[in-house]
Image: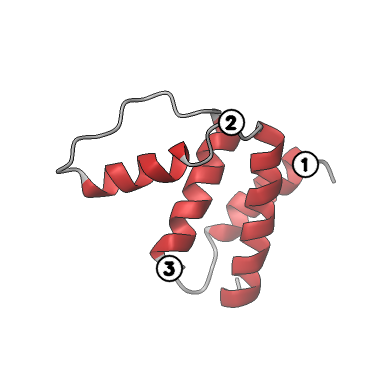
Amino acid sequence: MSLQADFDKATGDVRKLKKRPEDEDLKQLYGLYKQAIIGDVNIACPVMLDLKGKAKWEAWSLRKGLSKEDAMTAYVSKAKELIEKYGI
């Protein structure tokens, strides 16, 4: 299977987890997903009152400079880890 196919399968499988992952795991997945799909963060940091938006922006910003392929590979690995932990 190609990397893109593995990534697409992992994104679908993560949505089917039996239990909601911890916030830290979700932030890691979010950052890797955005880096894989869009690349480096391209929006301004949200205002301080938008705590959820700021956390998501920071998770994405931490991946700055990571190639799309490396982000996809890391996402697939993290998804497999969560599937083993929570099941689908």
* Relative image position of residue 29 (x, y in whole percent): 52, 52
- Labels 2, 3: front one: 2
Mark 3 crowd level (few <14, some 14–19, many ≥20, 10 Å Cα): few
Image point (52%, 58%), residue name: 15
User: In the picture provided, is 57 more to the left or to the right than 68?
Assistant: left
> Residue 65, labelled with which disc?
2
Q: Between residues 82 and 49, which one lies in front from this camera angle?
A: 49
Sequence-first disc among 1 and 3: 1
User: At 55% from the left edge and 28% from the top edge, which residue is drawn?
Assistant: 39
Image position of 44 with respect to 36: above or below: above
Per the image, label 1 sits on a secondary structure element best described as helix
Q: CA distance from mark 1 to mark 2?
A: 19 Å
Of 1 and 36, the residue lying toward us: 36
Q: Report the residue at 54% width, 68% height from top.
A: 17
Which residue lies most toward the right here?
1
Q: Label 3 belongs to which residue?
A: 22
**In the rendered structure, which amino acid carries the disc numbered 3?**
Glu
* Residue closer to the observer: 5 or 61: 61
Looking at marks 1 and 2 on the same chain, the residue that comes earlier in the sequence is marked by 1
Q: Is residue 42 above or below residue 50?
A: above
* Residue 3, image quadrant: top right
> Which amino acid type corresponds to the residue marked 2 in the rendered image?
Gly
Q: Percent position (x, y) of residue 10?
A: 65, 53
Q: If you read the primary sequence from the N terminus, does the residue marked by circle 2 or circle 3 appear first?
A: 3
Q: Quadrant of residue 65?
A: top right
Alpha-carbon distance for marks 2 and 3? 25 Å
**Residue at 60% of width from left, 36% of height from top?**
36
Q: Is residue 10 left or right of residue 34?
A: right
Q: Secondary structure at mark 2?
A: loop
The residue where tag 1 is placed is: 3
